[in-house]
Image (cartoon, grey):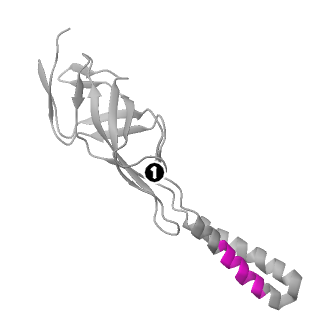
Amino acid sequence: MKVTLTEGSILAVRVGETLTSEKNESGDGWSGTLAEPLVIDGLVIAERGARVEGRVTDVKRAGRVKGVANMSVALTRFTTADGQRINVQTSGISRAGKDETKRDVGKVAIASGIGAAIGAIAGGGKGAGIGAGVGAGAGTGVVLATRGGPAVIATETLLRFRVSEPVTITEKLR
């Protein structure tokens, strides 16, 4: 029996491993399982829990001052109830890291405040001004030395992939 997985069909997948923009690269493979059975024309083509495979399609690490991390993944294959491994093309799903601009501004402000306090103790008002400048410089140095947070897709995350090209599947008799 032949059935067609149509363009626009949704495949619900649970990711089987943590993917992150810090450790993964474009082209890396990943695996998971179907979160819902794939049913076409009343026929269960792939059962819930069936193995799926995918690829990391794009990775952008966070910048040191600007730029948020981003990672995209796509589904490439699933296993049918009769054991076939079916190639599939899907749209990608992207995840972005946290925008840490506010945190970076806070680091500079705290370092500036600490510098001003130390300067005031050591040299009064003039020392406070110098200390604030030194502290701000130190805080800026810390911000420049660290990257923003990674983009992460955690284990067991539910992703819904949209099929981008139809696939004809021939059911094999056991």
Question: Does 140 sit above or below residue 52?
Answer: below
Q: Quadrant of residue 173?
A: top left
Q: Main secondary structure of the magenta part?
A: helix
Point 29% across, 34% down: residue: 11
Residue 124 drawn at (x, y percent) = 87, 88
| Residue appearing at x 43%, y 46% in the figure | 24
> In the drawing, does residue 44 fall left or right of residue 23?
left
Q: Where is residue 121, by image quadrant?
A: bottom right
- Foreground pick, 69 / 40: 69
Q: Amino acid at mark 1?
A: Ser
Q: Extreme left residue here?
A: 2
Report the residue at 72% width, 73% height from top. Answer: 111
Residue 61, horizontal then vertical, whole percent: 45, 58
Residue 123 is situated, as x and y percent measured from the top left of the image, at 87, 87
The residue that mark 1 highlights is 21
Say which quadrant the C terminus sits in: top left
Span highlighted in magenta in the image? 129-139
The secondary structure type at the circle numbered 1 is: loop
Image quadrant containing the N terminus: top left
The residue at the far top in this view is 174
Residue 118 in the image: above or below residue 63: below
Residue shown at 49% from the left, 40% from the top = 154
Q: Is residue 8 left or right of residue 112?
A: left
